[in-house]
Structure formats: structure tokens, C-alpha cells
Image: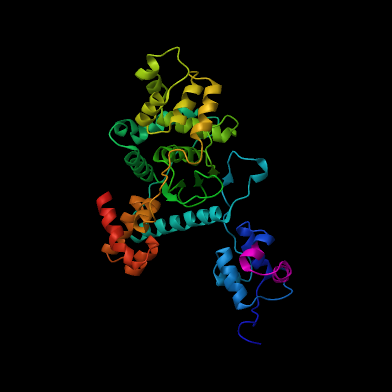
Amino acid sequence: MTEETKRIKANPIVLKWARECLMINETRATELLKMSFDYLNQLETGTINPTIEDLKSMSKAYKRTIANLLLDSTPIEKSLPKDCRTIESSKIGFFNEKTIMAVRKARALTSSLLELNQELNISIPSFIWKASVKDDPKKLGIFFRDLLGLSEILTKENHNQFLDTCIDKLEKKGIAIFQLSLTQDGLRGFSLIDESIPVIIIKRGSELPSAKIFTLFHELGHILLSDGALCNIALIQNESMIEQWCNMFAAELLVPTTLLLSHDIIAQNENKNVWNRKELFELANLFHVSPIVILRRLLTLGRTTPEFYKEQHEKYNKPQFGRSKEPEGRNLPKEVLKERGRNYLSLVFKAYDSNKIDLKDMADYLGLKLSYIPKTRELFNAWT
């Protein structure tokens, strides 16, 4: 028997587990592994053991190390957050493997963040606030707006600066926040409550900063409710109770009723319920949200009609609305800054400068090759 055909003892239950963890069905697996259905079935029933080439293929397709595939039994892993997307019921609970990998990455980054704080002997603040769906989300929205001091920074910064400031303020309250590439399943963000600290993930890349800002505080609502979730935040009227609560919380936090109704555009047009693009964008820019969030607030307050809201929602919710037609090529140092954030990077560089970690460790924490580190640090220094 040649080395290529030598079979290695493996638990078939573990092989099947590795596939199912990524929600890959047998048909898709045979395509990824370039093997027949019968051969896959033999591997997963223990009729035959895999070759080293089989294990390499599975490792690549299932995003597991070969050591994972050769475990004696399936390890205990945390489950995915609850599916809170507003989609066809048949799709609830089913995710693309890229989404599942994003959740894994979020957990890994959180673990790295905790390691860095421990290495530097820095204590992370405890996020002490809790709520229930019986609590008034509007009152809590105003409470957190005041707690974070958002009114003081509202008119001083553009959308991106406002987002960065909001992230900084929430991280100081004990929440880990990262921006990851969420290219599948219509996700805008998700939250984790089963880590040592609460975690919020918002979509990186083509997402507009105003949308990220709303997602950030929507997910804060989930954290308050101790209800981690994967969300698309559709802002439509058939949301679940929890999604409605989180949307109302985020909306009042970002666009307080009193401030919106007292603005000249609204106050001087008491009988108006159809608003033009210029008016909506002026209000949206003031509050650092999207025009559809302003319209949803006006609908809730009886200042527009359901028909007008629905018409505009369909317009603004198109996938390409507000996105660059010619996105720039990949810039890995810039991506790392956005993905891991100011707090995470400051800890990495501080640990390196104080000889707590070496250059290789720093590259591992950043997820970059050594050659990209100087540019990353240069961009970080300019950012801070």
C-alpha cells in the first residue's frame, strides 16, 4: 500500500460532525471534496478509514485542522446565536459556511482580546446593565444616549468618526466590538452573550457607516436582553417582538423623539406626511442614521403614512443603494484596522513594545504577514 492510499484510523462520527458544523450537505461535500457520494458515505459510516489526501481535503473544505478530524470524539462547541433574520421561515436556522466561519472568527478574536488584556494585566470593565422586553426600550435608549454622551459628539463628527467614537465608548463599558466580512445570508451584524464578555459584530466593507451605527446599537439591545442573535435588521413591520424592541431601543437612542419633533424640518410642517429626499437626508446626516431610519421614526410618530414608508423602504433597501460602483482593491492593513478596532490594535502594539509578545506573536494577533506590520502600525498611528 502506497503512502497516498494508506488509511488512517478516524472516528466517522467526528468526520460527519466536521461537515455538519458548517451546514454542508452531502451533495455539497462531494463537490468540495471531489469524491463520490458512496465514498463519502463509506467514510462517514466507518466502512473505510480516510487517506491522508482525504483528510487534507476535508480539512480545507470543513475549515478544521487534521488534528481536529482525528479526535476520538466530537468536542463540545458553543452553538450559533439565535437566527433573528426577517426572511422566509424555511431559511431560518440555515446559514452559509462563511457566516458560520465569521462566528468562529468572532469567538477567536474575543479570546485573543482577553489574552492581550491578561498579558498586560489590564482588567476589562464588566458590562452591568440588563433589561427585558417588558422594559420600555425608549426610556432605555435615552438612558444609554446620556450614559455614552452621544449628544455632545453628534454634530462634531462625520458618520465614520461618529461610528469610531461610539465603538470606543461601548468598549469602555465592557463590550468587545469587531467588524467582519458578512457576505452571505443578508446579515448586518450579530451579537454573542456566551463569551466571557459580550461581543458585537458589525458588517465590514460595503456597508454604509450610517447602517453600521444603527446595527451597533441594535445589537447593544440584544446584549441588554441577554439574547445573542444573528440579524439583518430589515426595519419592516412584521419583526419579532425582540427585533422590534431592539429597533425601538436603537432608534430612540440615535434619534430621540423630542429632538426629531423639535427640528425645524418637522416642527414647521405639522400637517406634512410625505417628505422629499433633501429633507430626509438632512435629518439622516444630523443624527448619523440612514434616511429609512428617519422615515421609520416618522411612521412610528404618525408623521408619515404606511404607504409612503413602504414605497421608500423598498427604494432605499435595494442591495446596491449607496454603495461604491467601483470598490477599491483589498488593503490588508486597512482591513485589519477596521476589523479589529482601535482598542485591540493598541493592546497588540503595547504588548509588543513592552516585550510581552514577540514579532511572530504580533503577526498572529493581527492575522497578517510580517511584511504588512509596518504599514499597519503607520495607519494605526495616523488613526489615533
> Residue at the location (45% across, 33% down)?
250
Residue most extreme to the top:
271
User: Residue 357, can we see it?
Assistant: no
**Residue 170 on image: x %, y %:** 38, 42
The answer to which image quadrant residue 159 occupies is top left
User: Residue 243, can we see it?
Assistant: yes
Where does the N terminus fall, quadrant-wise?
bottom right
Q: Is residue 375 left or right of residue 289?
A: left
Query: Is residue 7 one of those drawn in magenta?
Result: no
**Colouring used for the render:** rainbow
Q: Is residue 152 left or right of residue 243?
A: left
**Residue 177 on image: x %, y %:** 42, 48
Task: Identify the magenta region.
Answer: 29-43
> Residue at the location (60% across, 77% down)?
52
Q: Is residue 58 left or right of residue 312?
A: right
The answer to whether 301 is drawn above or below residue 86 in the figure is: above
Foreground residue among 228 and 379: 379
The answer to which image quadrant residue 22 occupies is bottom right
**Residue 16 on image: x %, y %:** 66, 64
**Residue 331 on image: x %, y %:** 36, 56
Query: Total of numbered circles in the picture?
Result: 0
> Residue at the location (47% across, 26% down)?
295
User: Is the stretch drawn in magenta largely helix, strand or loop?
Assistant: helix
Query: Is residue 36 one of those drawn in magenta?
Result: yes
The answer to whether 115 is drawn above or below residue 211 in the figure is: below
The answer to whether 328 is drawn above or below residue 289 in the figure is: below
